[in-house]
Amino acid sequence: MGRRAKVQPGQVKDFLQENGSAITVAEIAKYFGICEETVRRLLRILRKEGNPIIPTREGILDCREIKDEGDASLVKDYGVWLMALLVSLSQYASISKRPLIQARKMLELEEDRKKIRETLVMLTRVIDIIDIDHQLSD
C-alpha cells in the first residue's frame, strides 16, 4: 500500500471550477482520496490567496462560476447569513457607535499623536538634563 499523492490547492480550485456548482467537502475528499480536514485546509489556503470560494448550505461554491439562478441564490443566502452574523457579533460586543466612523476619527488623530509623541520625547530629554544637572551639582 503506497502513500497517497499530495493534493495541491490548485487542483481543488480546478475541480471546483470544472464542477460548476456547489459540491460538498465529502465529495471533494472522495474524489481526491483524502480526508475532509485536508480539503478544509486546502480551501482555507485558497481563500487566503483571494479565491472567491464560499461555503453554502449545499456545499462549497466557487463564486466565479455562477451559472444559474440556484447558485446565485446560494451566494445571496450566504451574504444574508454573513450580515446577520456580523450584526449579532456587534450586538454581542455592545458596539454603540458605527465602527467606520470611529476608525476614521482614529486616522485623523494620527498627526496629533505624532505631535504628542514628539512633545513627550522633548519633555523626557528636558527631565533627563535637569536630573543630570541636579546630580552634577550635588
Image: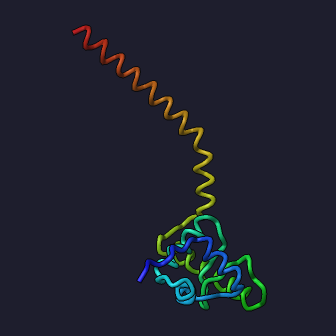
**Pick the front one: 69 or 10:** 10
Q: Quadrant of the C terminus?
A: top left
Q: Which of 126 and 36 is in front in this view?
A: 36
As drawn, the residue found furthest toward the left would be: 138
Q: Residue at x 66, y 86 (%)?
A: 77
Residue 131 in percent (x, y) is at 30, 18
24 on left or right of 67: left
State the residue lying farthest toward the front.
1
Identify which residue is drawn at 69% across, 85% down: 19
The residue under the point 62% across, 46% down is 108
Instruction: Residue at 78%, 89% (x, y): give it.
Output: 68
Outermost residue, right side? 68
Furthest toward the top, the residue is: 137
- The x and y percentages for residue 12 are 60, 77
Q: Quadrant of residue 69?
A: bottom right
Corner quadrant of residue 66: bottom right
The figure's colour scheme reads: rainbow
For the image, the number of numbered tags is: 0
Pick the front one: 116 or 2: 2
Q: In this view, does 92 lie to the left or right of 55?
A: left
Q: Can residue 76 be seen in this view?
A: no
Note whether residue 41 is visible.
yes
The image shows residue 98, relative to residue 32, as above or below, that is: above
Please give left or right for residue 86 compared with residue 4 in the image.
right
Residue 103 position in % (x across, y down)? 59, 55
Q: In which quarter of the image is the N terminus?
A: bottom left
Q: Position of residue 88 (x, y in %)?
A: 53, 78
In the depicted structure, whether residue 128 falls above or below residue 83: above
